[in-house]
Image: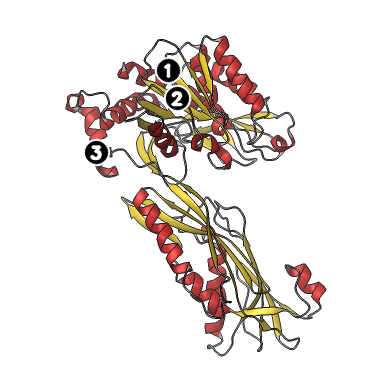
Amino acid sequence: MPNINTNTTQEILDIFYHLTTIPHGSKNTNEMANFIEIFAKEHGYEVRLDSVGNILAFKTNTQPKVCYQSHYDMVCVGVAEQKLALNLIKEKKVKNGITQTWLKAKDSSLGADNGVGVAIMLYFIKKNVDAEFLFTNDEEIGMIGAKGLEIPIKSNIIINLDSEVLGEITIGCAGGFDLLYKNEFETTDILPNWYYYTLQSKNFAGGHSGLDINNSEFKHQNAILESIKFLHDIIKQNKDSISIDIINWQGGEKRNSIPMNSKIVFACKEKIIAQSNNFFTINELKELPNELLDKTNEIFLQTPKGVDFSIFYSLLTNIKIGVIDTEDSNVQNSLNLSNISFANGKLSLAFMGRANTHALLSSNLDNLKCYLSKRLESQKQDKASIEVNEYYSPWEKQSTDSYDELQSFLTNAIKNKDILKQETQNFNNILYMMYESMYDVVDKFNIKPKIVELHAGLECGILLSKLNQLGSKDIVALSIGPSIRSPHSIREEVWIESAGAVVQILYSFMDKIQ
């Protein structure tokens, strides 16, 4: 077993155990906020609160060098959603020759995201560490706390504890937008003597629309887009002698996930030749009664209404959906089609765009709006609408060096420590001090540290922007954290020893920045 202080790990675990007994699902965080406030005050810290539920704990008459930050709400799934007591389970696993202890909750999300980060911060408060501690509220439902932050900090370094792989130092993440597009089309009456079919997706795995957007496995592709390709192939197989009218189309799940489900009801004047495969089931509806169609999808009008498939095909295949830009093999810019709903001529599409720079995010949104503003065939007059529901800034890496250049710098710096600049606030210097602090700790777990940029959302970009507005300028941000698997699900689990390792890394880092 690596020489990680087991007492430290147990103290953090004991705090986390207590946190699991306090309800703190998003929008239901008052009890947790009260606990954090009282805990900090009992240990001699001043506390400031703001109107959106953020909490800053700090010592008076000091000039702290670092502010630690975690969000204190969680995603409640399963037992946690029912506000019942969690049944915690430990399991031993072996990886890289190291025995690891993993903690999960039976039939429930655990709240390790970001509860272990909160526990680490409370542990530091208990140990009287001279730092600032920012607990943000309602991150899981749109980063509400970060967006509404009203409390400045004194520190010039902020360490977010919401990363989920021990050994990774996150130095940037994507911003994003949600866009809803609606339109209405002239329809064709679908007659009883037409042939009716359903196309249902199956075996798609979905995934995170940022982290998994570059996954080339077919099961991780967008089920809605693959449905389009499947129907287009049917037309080709029938030598373009048939036309397809879409009656109803429902697809997608959450705004930030790659769709697993797509279900289409369509009709043709001619019988088609088509076969099901591992990812799609196609069935002919032998009868037309409305009750049969109702069970298949949405409720239809007395006479089913359809729109030519070519309109959908042209619309969706001319939008670049998926990865748009990369740098050093890292996704920098992407667009996901999250949901589709179509019935009786009315179409609704939900998109989520992500980008790791302000310029790319703005370009992504502008290009999408420009294309969707074009008039389509059979479109009804003045029925198209575009609504941007959400827009949040990316956390751009605070260095002009590429990732390959930064990784090379860190590797060389480990070997030649005298190459470092002396000014503490230099980003590369601060990054190196975190890298060096991490290097010795994770090496004992047979892990090599690396820098990463997430094509997903952390609060850092929003916090840096808000803190700048509040007068806290020129802040360097990094993110690390313990290893967590399958957050936001009943499979969520945390590697217990990694929490102790994070504390050891942070103690070393604080020694270096003094």
Closer to us: 74 or 372? 372
Tell whether 188 sits left or right of 409.
Answer: right
Three-letter residue code for mark 2? Tyr
Circle 1 residues within 10 Å: few <14, some 14–19, many ≥20: many
Mark 3 to mark 1 CA distance (whole Å): 31 Å
Of discs 2 and 3, which sits in the foreground? 2
Quadrant location of the C terminus in the rendered image? top left
Is residue 210 something that shows in the picture? no
Which is nearer the N-term, disc 2 or disc 3? 2
Residue 29, numbered circle:
none
Q: Which residue is mark 2?
A: 68
Tell whether 319 sits left or right of 20.
Answer: left
Closer to us: 331 or 191? 191
Q: Which residue is mark 1?
A: 131
Tell whether 328 sits left or right of 199.
Answer: left
Quick one: SS at disc 1? loop
Circle 2 residues within 10 Å: few <14, some 14–19, many ≥20: many
Q: Which residue is mark 3?
A: 408
In the rendering, at what x and y percent does residue 121 appear? Answer: 50, 21
Which is nearer the N-term, disc 2 or disc 1? 2
Quick one: SS at disc 2? strand
Mark 2 to mark 3 CA distance (whole Å): 27 Å
Three-letter residue code for mark 1? Ala
Mark 2 to mark 1 CA distance (whole Å): 7 Å
Three-letter residue code for mark 3? Ser
The relative height of residue 153 versus residue 361 in the rendered view (above or below) is above
Quadrant of residue 76 within the rendered picture: top right
Residue drawn at x 41%, y 39% is 461
